[in-house]
Image: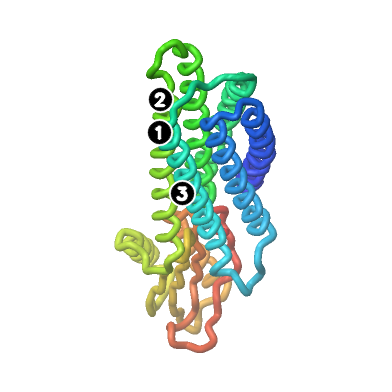
């Protein structure tokens, strides 16, 4: 159900982004304002970022088959990196326009400003709703894609508020000579927030793209569960674990006496898997019969709790 909400939120964002881009283009053509030019470019790039996220979401929903069981989750991280790159590009565009506005300041005006003011209110409300929904989905599923989307929508909301405020102040204080600097200064503040968000998304996504071992706390949690369930196996050969993207893969190698009934073994294996799974939100836990060196091992029955993907 959460995955459906995740794709639904992104699809809504794509539609809203397309409409927002069209409206900001109309405002730009009507006003010929440097600030509205920055707003149009920012909105257009944000629309591309959300579109890429939606395409990745659809690809993940279809799955990739057994051939990509370990790597399909990284598509979310790659999409997040593209979002971060686009946010960095937005930062450069807004900064260049702000510097140009500081060097050659001018008052804003025209019907395009009125169109933009209305658009900031409407799409600010939409972005606030999408930000909240994406943030909840990211927390529930530990999805880097939805986390980057939440940051993007917050940035869009922040931009809506600042652009609305700067345009309003420019119009209200048009008789003041210094008011021509309101828009470029506000644009620089927006650019700074976008850069901070892009750095955060980039750093977290690059880290998740790298495969690595689990943290010591996670390893201790696994061993603690094995100690609590020590009566459910006769021999513990070892544990192998690794993190790939935002997923965790754990293989537990155990042994049983030959006289044990297969039904009892299956019950014990299920209890071990359930105990270990409760420490992870996005993990694949396999209990394997036999040592790690065995070429052909017998895996546990395909028990799939809600936490696993």
Q: How crowded is mark 3: few (under 14 residues within 10 Å), some or many (20 or more)?
A: some
Which badge, 1 or 2, is on the more N-terminal residue? Answer: 1
Q: Which of 240 and 305 is in front in this view?
A: 240
Residue 272: x, y in percent?
A: 46, 64
> Split into 4 quadrants, where in the image is the N terminus?
top right
Q: In this view, does 53 lie above or below 31?
A: below
Residue 219: x, y in percent?
A: 34, 64
In the image, what residue occupies the spot 56% across and 19% down?
Answer: 109
150 horizontally vs 196: left or right: right
Q: Is mark 3 on a helix, strand or loop?
A: helix
Q: Mark 2 points at which residue?
A: 181
Q: Nearer the viewer, mark 3 or mark 1?
A: 1
Mark 1 and mark 2: span between their CA atoms? 10 Å
Q: Residues within 10 Å of mark 1 (few under 14, many from 20)?
A: few
Residue 4: x, y in percent?
A: 66, 46
Q: Which of marks 1 and 2 is in front?
A: 1
Q: Which of 190 and 241 is in front in this view?
A: 190
Q: Is residue 199 above or below residue 32?
A: below
Kindly indicate whether the residue at mark 3 contacts the one at mark 2 (C-beta within 8 angstroms): no
122 horizontally vs 237: left or right: right
| Residue 80 appears in view | yes
Q: Which of marks 2 and 3 is in front?
A: 2
In the image, what residue occupies the spot 52% across and 72% down?
Answer: 265
In the image, what residue occupies the spot 54% across and 40% down?
Answer: 42
Q: Residue 88 carries which label?
A: 3
Kindly indicate whether the residue at mark 2 contacts the one at mark 1 (C-beta within 8 angstroms): no
> Split into 4 quadrants, where in the image is the C terminus?
bottom right
Q: What element carries label 1?
A: helix
| Residue 143 appears in view | no
Residue 263: x, y in percent?
A: 58, 71
Q: Residue 103 carries which label?
A: 1
């Amino acid at each position: 159900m959460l995955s459906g909400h995740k794709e639904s939120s992104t699809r809504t964002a794509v539609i809203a982004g397309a409409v927002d881009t069209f409206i900001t283009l109309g405002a730009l053509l009507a006003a010929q304002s440097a600030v509205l030019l920055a707003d149009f470019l920012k909105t257009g790039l944000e629309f591309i970022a959300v579109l890429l996220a939606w395409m990745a979401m659809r690809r993940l929903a279809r799955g990739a088959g057994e051939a990509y069981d370990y790597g399909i989750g990284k598509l979310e991280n790659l999409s997040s990196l593209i979002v971060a790159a686009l946010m960095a590009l937005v930062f450069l565009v807004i900064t260049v326009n702000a510097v140009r506005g500081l060097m050659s300041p001018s008052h804003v005006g025209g019907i395009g400003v009125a169109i933009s003011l209305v658009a900031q209110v409407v799409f600010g409300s939409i972005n606030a709703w999408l930000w909240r929904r994406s943030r909840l989905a990211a927390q529930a599923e530990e999805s880097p894609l939805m986390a980057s989307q939440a940051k993007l929508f917050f940035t869009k909301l922040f931009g809506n508020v600042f652009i609305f405020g700067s345009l309003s102040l420019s119009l209200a204080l048009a008789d003041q000579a210094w008011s021509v600097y309101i828009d470029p200064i506000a644009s620089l503040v927006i650019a700074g927030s976008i850069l901070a968000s892009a750095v955060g998304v980039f750093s977290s996504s690059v880290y998740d793209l790298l495969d690595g071992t689990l943290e010591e706390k996670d390893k201790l949690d696994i061993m603690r569960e094995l100690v609590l369930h020590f009566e459910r196996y006769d021999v513990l050969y070892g544990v192998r674990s690794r993190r790939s993207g935002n997923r965790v893969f754990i293989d537990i190698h155990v042994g049983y006496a030959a006289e044990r009934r297969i039904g009892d073994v299956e019950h014990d294996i299920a209890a071990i898997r359930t105990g270990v799974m409760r420490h992870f939100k996005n993990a694949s836990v396999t209990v394997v019969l036999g040592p790690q060196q065995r070429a052909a091992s017998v895996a546990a029955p395909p028990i799939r709790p809600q936490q696993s993907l």
